[in-house]
Amino acid sequence: MRYVFLVFILGVIGVLAILGPRGEVSTRPPLEVFSDMDRMPKYQPQAKSAFFADGRTDRLPVDGTVARGTYYENEYYSTGESGEEFGSGFPIGVDYDSISRGEDRFNIYCSICHGAAGDGDSMTKKYGMLTVANLTEQRLVDYTDGQLYDVVKNGKGLMLGYADRLTVEDRWNVVLYVRALQRAANGTVDDLTPAKREELGL
């Protein structure tokens, strides 16, 4: 009988030990039977390491490796360069959908600085940022399509690149829309078809 009593007492103590403190706040570290690898030895970013000869935890990518999702067989499509020169032309379909997509991305990422018309008359200019490029000026009209793509991807001057925010195709869509803005800002009567000129009485 005493063994039954002893088991009962141990059972009560066990239940109280487990359920008794529920809901209470404690500053003491929890009692862990299995840590589930919550506290594994690891390197902190930019910490020192005795394992590597240069003493750095952060490692550079191995030479010649390409990160998954960043390799494109068409070099011009991914860089805007053909060999050692910036190329011309669009490696994507030039159609209404592409221009519309470019307009959408431009309005999200570019118009705050370059203005909705691309002329540099923007909100940031009103607050004193006077070095924003006018995308419709002749200097940038003369850029090749690959050069414009490179600026969108890698940035230029104070402008940061958008390689981490825009896909490769969306960068080209933005370039396509910038070309449309340039044509709209610098168009002349000579750009109109004879039928359109006649319709407008020009």
Image (spheres, rainbow, N blue to C red):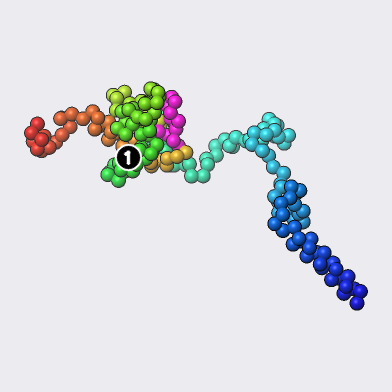
At x 52%, y 40%, the residue is 66
Relative vertical location of residue 90 with respect to residue 15 in this rendering, above or below: above
The amino acid type of the residue labelled 1 equals Glu
Name the residue nearer the viewer: 2 or 64.
2
Name the residue nearer the viewer: 127 or 73.
127
**Residue 25 placement (x, y as % from top left):** 71, 51
Magenta-drawn segment: 152-163
Q: Which residue is mark 1?
A: 103
SS assignment at label 1: helix
Dividing the picture into quarters, in which one does residue 196 lie?
A: top left
Question: Is residue 156 a member of the stretch shown in magenta?
Answer: yes
Dividing the picture into quarters, in which one does residue 60 lie?
A: top right
At x 35%, y 29%, the residue is 122
Residue 15 as seen in the image, left or right of residue 198: right
At x 42%, y 34%, the residue is 153
Relative vertical location of residue 184 with respect to residue 32 in this rendering, above or below: above
At x 14%, y 36%, the residue is 193
Quarter of the image for the N terminus: give it. Answer: bottom right
Residues packed near mark 1 inside 10 Å, few (<14), some (14 to 19) or many (20 plus): many
For the view shown, which residue lies furthest in the right direction? 2
**Residue 79 placement (x, y as % from top left):** 42, 35
Quarter of the image for the C terminus: give it. Answer: top left
Query: Number of marks in the image?
Result: 1
**Residue 28 placement (x, y as % from top left):** 76, 48
Q: Is residue 82 visible?
A: no
Relative vertical location of residue 130 with respect to residue 98 in this rendering, above or below: above
Relative vertical location of residue 166 with respect to residue 31 in this rendering, above or below: above
Question: Is residue 135 a member of the stretch shown in magenta?
Answer: no
**Residue 101 placement (x, y as % from top left):** 33, 43
